Image (cartoon, rainbow, N blue to C red):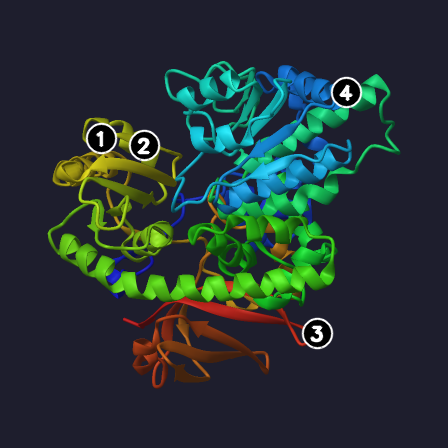
């Protein structure tokens, strides 16, 4: 049995409990892979050679038909009618990266039909989330002729707005992936895999995944009708970099179809053939080696999302659709400055939020709620950082309008096992409106309702955790020997488990009685190295500088993840410590 560790008061346990070692050995033999890789697959419920092959080698050929999505046939027919009759087309997205990448994808695809769609992304600070009547009125066609409005990553709750759009002469297609309410907008077509009577086999697409499927449906129908043939039709692979960006950034499960789409999208991103992606990669220092889901989460997405957070999402959209390298570099530079501004705003707010969260943590709260005079654009990322730090769902709220004491806007982030949207359904009496999905949500409430919301939110989460998560644990996947973890065959295949993220967590390993060769601190981080077979392997523990005392005299208990990266053209393996504890 693995000993308990007191770091962060979490016990170390195996992910998903005991496994069948005989089955793991059979799987390793059938796949001709190292035993440790078979263990990692079994930990994820992948126990047969067939399912393992599908997981390790996802194929775009396994994508189901777009016409399994409810209303896809209606949506495709409407777009083709707009193409044939030369209607004006408007794409209305959202200000986060899922909405921006959805808009970019559909805009670029429609160009292949010579449709120059007008794109609109709302200003988070002045328009708020989703479509609104003011923007619809501005975008409405003149002259009384028909026009087409396509929403991406929004619209599923916009009952009044869709009705208004139709009054303005728009035919409306809603494409979205957020949880549908009981009453739906009266759109001409609604494409959302979460609709109850939708036969699509995978409901967890991101908004950009739904937009990609709309493009798939249009392409398929036009090939069928003879407008294109398979040689002249646009290759949809070129749009998968957008799908990877939006899907990873929106923290949807990286399983099933999302895994297929993101894996292929990461290959396209790694080619860096788009001027916008190349300029962004230069700024984010991701020009070497493969681009990973982690690179999206921590390097690419923050720069693109910063534009939307501070009210300039159109800059990110222009970068993603830019065809001129010089302009792309200029835009990437502007996004870098905006991201620096975002970081400063985040620093200014974070201490206040963490202070409130710490007090509530001391009170034994199961869910945390912070309120203050924060920039509306950064409350989501602050909620995410707080949820990660405390391992609990967090909502951060601020005044809807600076200085206005009436309405509050809130952004929340959750943790594995707690469906934030379902929790908010049980808090509905304390809110004016809310929306989102399992891991992220937004809401509006009266300031006077804040105490009631905080109490109800805490109670519902506590009841949910009691039912689903009785213990706070640090989960590990395997206790390897040094020979197993540094085996070249295993290291060479390890990236086949990627992309890591929601639903497919990065494997965590545990080495007991591990000797640390050398160690030193860098700011509040711990740099260290271990030796195996005469070779040094470097590691880092972010935020673990205070553990250095355990690394100098005696072997330690090392809990870590492994990173394959490229530095100055050379592949290197690095161990990222989750915890470093004294051997008991």
Given this view, does label 2 or label 1 mark the residue nearer the observer? 2
Q: Which residue is mark 1?
A: 427
Specify which label sits upstream in the sequence, 4 or 2: 4
- The residues bearing labels 3 and 4 have C-alpha atoms spaced at a distance of 50 Å
SS class of the residue under badge 3?
loop
Q: Which residue is mark 2?
A: 434
Given this view, does label 2 or label 3 mark the residue nearer the observer? 2
Identify which residue is drawn at 59% across, 33% down: 91
- The residues bearing labels 1 and 3 have C-alpha atoms spaced at a distance of 52 Å
Residues 18 and 318: in front is 318
Mark 3 closeness class: few <14, some 14–19, many ≥20 residues within 10 Å: few
Query: Is residue 492 in view from this perspective?
Result: no
Specify which label sits upstream in the sequence, 2 or 1: 1
Identify which residue is drawn at 85% across, 27% down: 228
Identify which residue is drawn at 63% across, 15% down: 74
Given this view, does label 1 or label 3 mark the residue nearer the observer? 1
**Residue 546, x across and y down, in percent:** 30, 77
Is the C terminus in the top left, top right, bottom left or bottom right quadrant? bottom left
Specify which label sits upstream in the sequence, 2 or 3: 2
């Amino acid at each position: 049995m693995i000993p308990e560790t007191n770091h962060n008061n979490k016990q170390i346990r195996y992910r998903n409990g005991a496994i069948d070692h005989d089955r793991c050995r059979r799987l390793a033999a059938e796949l001709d892979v190292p035993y440790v890789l078979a263990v990692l697959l079994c930990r994820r419920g992948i126990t047969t050679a067939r399912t393992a092959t599908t997981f390790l080698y996802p194929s775009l050929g396994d994508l189901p038909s777009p016409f399994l999505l409810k209303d896809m046939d209606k949506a495709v027919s409407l777009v083709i009618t707009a193409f044939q009759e030369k209607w004006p087309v408007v794409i209305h997205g959202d200000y986060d990266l899922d909405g921006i990448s959805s808009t970019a994808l559909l805009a670029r695809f429609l160009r292949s039909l010579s449709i120059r769609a007008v794109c609109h992304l709302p200003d988070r600070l002045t328009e708020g989330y989703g479509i609104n009547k003011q923007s619809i009125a501005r975008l409405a066609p003149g002259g009384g002729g028909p026009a087409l409005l396509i929403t991406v990553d929004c619209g599923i709750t916009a009952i009044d707005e869709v009705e208004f759009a139709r009054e303005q002469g728009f035919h409306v297609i809603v494409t979205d992936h957020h949880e549908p309410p009981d009453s739906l907008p009266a759109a001409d077509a609604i494409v959302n895999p979460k609709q109850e009577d939708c036969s699509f086999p995978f409901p967890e697409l991101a908004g950009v995944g739904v937009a990609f499927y709309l493009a798939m449906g249009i392409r398929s129908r036009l090939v069928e009708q003879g407008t294109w043939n398979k040689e002249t039709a646009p290759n949809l692979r070129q749009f998968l970099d957008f799908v990877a960006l939006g899907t990873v950034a929106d923290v949807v499960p990286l399983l099933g179809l999302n895994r297929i789409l993101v894996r292929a999208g990461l290959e396209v991103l790694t080619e860096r053939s788009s001027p916008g992606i190349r300029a962004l990669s230069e700024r984010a220092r991701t020009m070497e080696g493969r681009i990973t889901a982690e690179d999206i989460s921590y390097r690419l997405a923050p720069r693109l999302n910063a534009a939307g957070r501070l009210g300039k999402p159109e800059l990110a959209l222009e970068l993603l659709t830019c065809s001129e390298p010089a302009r792309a570099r200029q835009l990437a530079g502007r996004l870098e400055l905006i991201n620096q501004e975002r970081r400063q705003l985040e620093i200014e707010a974070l201490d206040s939020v963490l202070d409130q969260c710490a007090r509530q943590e001391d009170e034994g709260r199961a869910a945390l709620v912070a309120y203050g005079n924060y920039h509306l654009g950064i409350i989501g990322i602050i909620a995410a950082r707080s949820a990660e730090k405390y391992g609990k769902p967090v909502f951060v709220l601020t005044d809807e309008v600076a200085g206005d004491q009436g309405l509050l806007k809130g952004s929340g982030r959750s943790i594995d096992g707690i469906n934030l949207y379902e929790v908010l359904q049980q808090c509905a009496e304390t809110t004016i409106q809310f929306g989102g999905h399992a891991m992220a949500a937004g809401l509006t409430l009266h300031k006077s309702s804040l105490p009631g919301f905080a109490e109800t939110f805490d109670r519902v989460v506590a009841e949910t955790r009691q039912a689903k998560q009785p213990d706070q644990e640090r989960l590990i996947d395997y206790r390897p020997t040094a020979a197993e973890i540094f085996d070249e065959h295993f290291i060479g295949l390890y990236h086949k488990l990627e992309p890591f993220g929601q639903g497919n967590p990065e494997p965590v390993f545990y080495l007991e009685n591990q000797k640390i060769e050398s160690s030193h601190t860098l700011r509040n981080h711990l740099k260290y190295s271990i030796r195996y077979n005469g070779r040094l392997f470097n590691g880092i523990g972010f935020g673990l500088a205070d553990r250095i005392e355990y690394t100098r005299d005696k072997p330690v208990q090392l809990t870590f993840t492994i990173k394959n990266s490229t530095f100055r053209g050379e592949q290197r393996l690095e161990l990222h410590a989750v915890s470093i504890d004294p051997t008991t």
